Amino acid sequence: MQKPQWKGNPEPPPKLYVAWQSSAVTCLVVGGVEGGRICQSSMRCRAGHGRGRIALWSQSMDAWLSQGRTKKRKVDDTVQQHEPVKRTKSENETKPRPQQKSAISRPDSTKTAQPDKPDHVLVVTEEEGDIFDAPPNTLIIHACNCDGSWGGGIALAFKKHYPDAYGKYAAHCKRSGGDLVNTAYLIPPQAGDDSKHFVGCLFTSRHYGRRKDSPTKILAATKPAMLDLLKQVKEFNAKADEGDRVNEVRICKINSGLFKVPWAKTRTVLEGIDVSAEDVKELKVVSPEE
Ligand SMILES: Nc1ncnc2c1ncn2[C@@H]1O[C@H](COP(=O)(O)OP(=O)(O)OC[C@H]2O[C@H](OP(=O)(O)O)[C@H](O)[C@@H]2O)[C@@H](O)[C@H]1O
């Protein structure tokens, strides 16, 4: 575990609680410090600190930081300052939470959702292989336009593997009049399809080709679209028999081909998604060997 960056000050820091998540969703710190001792802390960080939005911050911490540091952390306009939260920590909170191992988990009714402190952000792993060579009950996700076209890139491969799913996707686009950005469409395995694969469509751009949305818009649509898909998976699994549920989730490097958004940016968005309330905790990115 990495310590937050307040070393260098000879005095112990005042009591504070920090919930910190960067706007670019690269770093998450949820922790507490009291009398110089870290009482509870967990951190995911893949791209460094410093761009964070601090949601809870002790007033006295600012003064403490400015004593001990020549360069104070730059805090953006979105910072909200609060007095430290006063509460007693339970024994459980002082221990690191075990990492969720399964991609899909059943809901734990004993947990209460705490919006400021996600229990889980989506775990994204990458491997080489054929995304379509997946076991039954795998959900395979790709990014889509809202025009009802799977005309190029991996979408064309989806059309060939799952022609019935393409029909459902095209009808869904037609029904909605094309206004689907920020949403998703879960297509369960079609009758007669031995693969028993689910298809997940993330509507991240209004149009395709030269009329596709800008990378900024595509990235902004990626998180709500993914959350919508995860919600649909949860609803589906809640009603389905055990052998019919989504068991594993695979995704290609969405947005990075015809949509021309660098994969690292999309990955950063995906890794910041709070999945505390979702069944799916893990995404496996599968791409062909380079
Ligand atoms: N057979 C294969 N197996 C495994 N991975 C494969 C593959 N073929 C390509 N990839 C990779 O899959 C990633 C995504 O790249 P893509 O260009 O597909 O998708 P995107 O998300 O950027 O853009 C979506 C729009 O593209 C489509 O085509 P249309 O606009 O309809 O013509 C849609 O309908 C949307 O509109 C890149 O890493 C590709 O290397």
Image (cartoon, grey):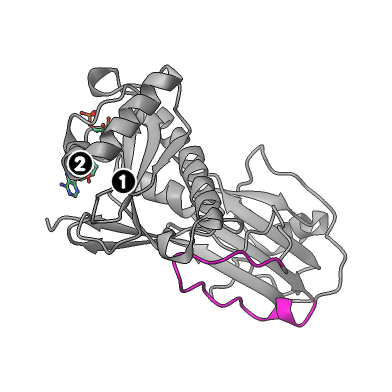
Closer to the eye: label 2 or 1: 1
Which SS class for mark 2?
helix
Magenta extent: 90-109
Q: Farthest residue to the front: give it.
A: 192
Q: Nearer the viewer, residue 239 or 218?
A: 239
Q: Is residue 102 magenta?
A: yes
Q: Looking at the rendered structure, which numbered label has been put on residue 154?
A: 2
Residue at 16% of width from left, 40% of height from top?
Answer: 160
Which quarter of the image is occupied by the N terminus?
Answer: bottom right
Q: Position of residue 217 (x, y in %)?
A: 42, 28
Q: Nearer the viewer, residue 3 or 283?
A: 283
Q: Is residue 24 visible?
A: no
- Cα distance, mark 2 to mark 1? 19 Å
The residue indicated by pointer 1 is 190
- Mark 2 or 1, nearer chain start: 2
Q: How many marks?
A: 2
